[in-house]
Image (cartoon, rainbow, N blue to C red):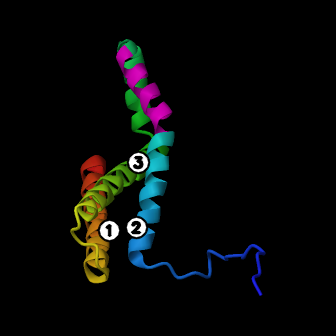
Amino acid sequence: MNNKQPVYLNLFKIKLPLPGIVSLLHRVTGVVLFLAIPFSIYLLQLSMHDKADFQRALELINHPLVLLFEVILFAALIYHFFAGLRFLLMDIDIGENKRPAELSSWMVLAATTLSTLIFLIMRVF
């Protein structure tokens, strides 16, 4: 008997493998980067208007919440970059099997973490 009722999938109970998580986060970081465009354009426009607005933009950039936003935005950007490179390599048949895919996923996470820590250290100190 064919049951054509929709199946309820609880996404919190499904154990997604690491390459799947990396793929999902690549999409999420793309959305975050897209949503950050208006604020980035606002800061650019503010900094280019006149000297007083440039000083205001500098004060805004040095605010702790904006610093947190910068770190999150940088982490999203660098993650999206490294995961994008991973997907480009997979498009040319490099690292498609299970073990290389897991290894490249770990490499993306490690490179993102290291790059974000370096950015944070350089930005704060």
- Give, as a single range, the part of the protein colored magenta: 36-48
x and y percent of residue 53 in the render?
42, 18
Question: In the rendered image of this protein, does residue 103 appear above or below residue 90?
Answer: below
Asked whether disc 1 touches disc 2, contact meaning CB atoms under 8 Å apart, the reply is yes
Q: Is 3 on the left-hand or right-hand side of 16?
A: right
Question: In the rendered image of this protein, does residue 17 appear above or below residue 36?
Answer: below
Give the label, 2 or 3, closer to the camera.
2
Which element type, helix, strand or loop, lies under badge 2?
helix
Q: CA distance from mark 2 to mark 3?
A: 17 Å
Which element type, helix, strand or loop, lies under badge 3?
helix
For label 2, the residue is 22
| Picture residue at 76% right of the left edge, 75% below the top | 4
For label 1, the residue is 109
* Residue closest to the far front: 1
**Quick check: is 41 in the magenta stretch?**
yes
Residue 73's disc is: 3
Q: Earlier in the sequence, mark 2 or mark 3?
A: 2
Asked whether disc 1 touches disc 3, contact meaning CB atoms under 8 Å apart, the reply is no
- What amino acid is labelled 3 in the image? Leu
Give the label, 1 or 3, closer to the camera.
1
Q: Magenta stretch: dominant SS?
A: helix
The N terminus lies in which quarter of the figure? Answer: bottom right
Give the label, 1 or 2, closer to the camera.
2
x and y percent of residue 7 in the render?
72, 76
